[in-house]
Image: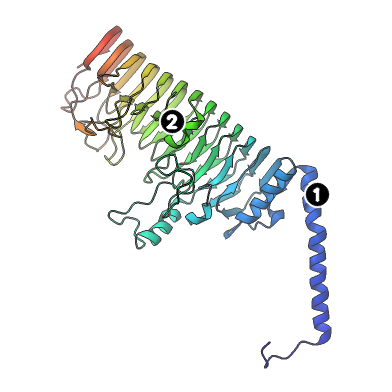
Amino acid sequence: MDKTQKPKPLGVRRNQARWAAVLVLAAMVVLPLICGYAADTGVFNVLDFGARGDGTNNDTVAIQKAIDACASQGGGQVVLPSGKTFLTGALTLHSGMDFHLANGAVLKGSANWRDYGHPGALLFAKDATNITVSGNGILDGNDRAVWQQLADEEAGGDVNKAGWWPESFTGDWWPFDKLPNQPQTHGGRPMMMIFIGCHQVRLHDFTLRNAPSWTLHPIGCEDVVIDSISIHNAWDVPNNDGIDVDHCRNVRIANCFIESADDCIVIKNTPNFAAYGASAHITVTGCTVSSRSTALKVDEIYTPPGARDIVFADCVVFHSNRGLSIQSLDEGDIDNVLFANITVETAFQPQKWWGAAEPIHISHFPRTAKTKLGHVRNIRFSNIICQSENGAFLMGWSSSPLENVALDNVRMEIAKTSNVPGGYYDERPVGVFTNGIFEYKLAGIYARDIDGLALNHVEVNWGKASDKAYGKGLDQKDVKNLEADHVLLRP
């Protein structure tokens, strides 16, 4: 003690000691009562576990305590109450729980990548059963702050520094390149939600916004329902995909609204999770989506047995670059894919974004000289209405043509609508045998290396027939077994 400081009177010190003892006793009494009440009701309010919800203090520890208490009681509902903003890093959910964001509640991601640790996402679950995220609240990925924090550490604070690019992922669960047991040597961008090997997953009603990397990434999950969620991501942030369904089966995505600079909904098999097997039995229905890249896609099927039995139906695609797409560069087969009852609006975007305003796009070629390319077969586009700056692009590979592709009741109105110069096709991501972007007169249907192409009730109309960027109604080469019925393809 400072010798110049006068000691407090003995009575005051005794009173302070008594109050300290009272507070300790109160904590010993009240906390069990809170936990007991939560156990009785099955509802675990994060405020009762010390969360402040002021948007400034980090509430990770307090909210994780509520989650763990819920799990210890066999499950229940963890509630983030209305009118609060909870700033956190990674939170790990468990079986048998509903993580509920009340209307007006915000769960906001920390700007510091270190706060996401091993999970690498704002919400994380692994090997959980019967897990739900619900409510009308908001998950905010805090994208601008994440990028700025990384720039402060790695680029002298300049997010636009030439040659600098923040790593697309952080944590242990990268879909590409880094394996879980490999150390991370520098910072990266967290995803917003990663669920791995989970069963009976239910995600509904909440909003996600400002994702710094992929937004929602279920991996190797079974029996998944994603219903009535909204995703609002920035139009200038790459890698902020909406929903990436990876090695999952029995998935239903319905009634969602997604706007994102990168792909909106993608079915994929990434290489780091090959042990989880095929992607299969997946429906995407009643969704409205807008993307600066691709709206609805099957892509990156790295490993056998591949992806099959997939339906995209009753959707609206607007203000997008590519509309409906299958991209195959790897060993996994893509079988039995149906796009039905969809309206598509596309226009050219600056070339930093992959795509060339195609409303319908299939590309199939090897990623490397050593790639043993799989098959793309039994693909149907039915009842599709397109307003676009380009036509359909269907490109197989000479030694592995597309098989059994059908356009049934498809109408395309093709006209120049944007101020971005067109007159090119885009094969990115490129393989060793392709050129990436190449200039070409755009066709109503560009078809290469296909065995079995059926055109039934297909119509191509040109908004400006004199536009020099456009060419043939059907530009085809090495197409076998071409069938056409009620086809109007104006040059």
- Residue 60 image point, x, y percent: 60, 54
- For disc 1, the neighbor class at 10 Å (few under 14, some 14 to 19, many from 20) is few
Considering only vertical position in the picture, is 3 above or below 372? Answer: below
Kindly tell me whether residue 111 is visible in this rendering: no
Q: What residue appears at the point 77 percent right and 87 percent down from the top-left corner?
A: 8
- Residue 488 image point, x, y percent: 27, 11
- Residue 192 image point, x, y percent: 51, 44
Considering only vertical position in the picture, is 123 above or below 331? Answer: below
Element assignment for label 2: strand
Of circles 1 and 2, which is in front? 2
| Left or right side of 247 for 102 | right
Considering only vertical position in the picture, is 429 above or below 487? Answer: below
Question: Where does label 1 land, which residue?
Answer: 36
Q: What residue appears at the point 39 percent right and 42 percent down from the top-left corner?
A: 177
Tell me which amino acid carries mark 2. Lys
Question: Where does label 2 land, which residue?
Answer: 268
Kindly tell me whether residue 71 is visible in this rendering: yes
* Between discs 1 and 2, the one toward the N terminus: 1
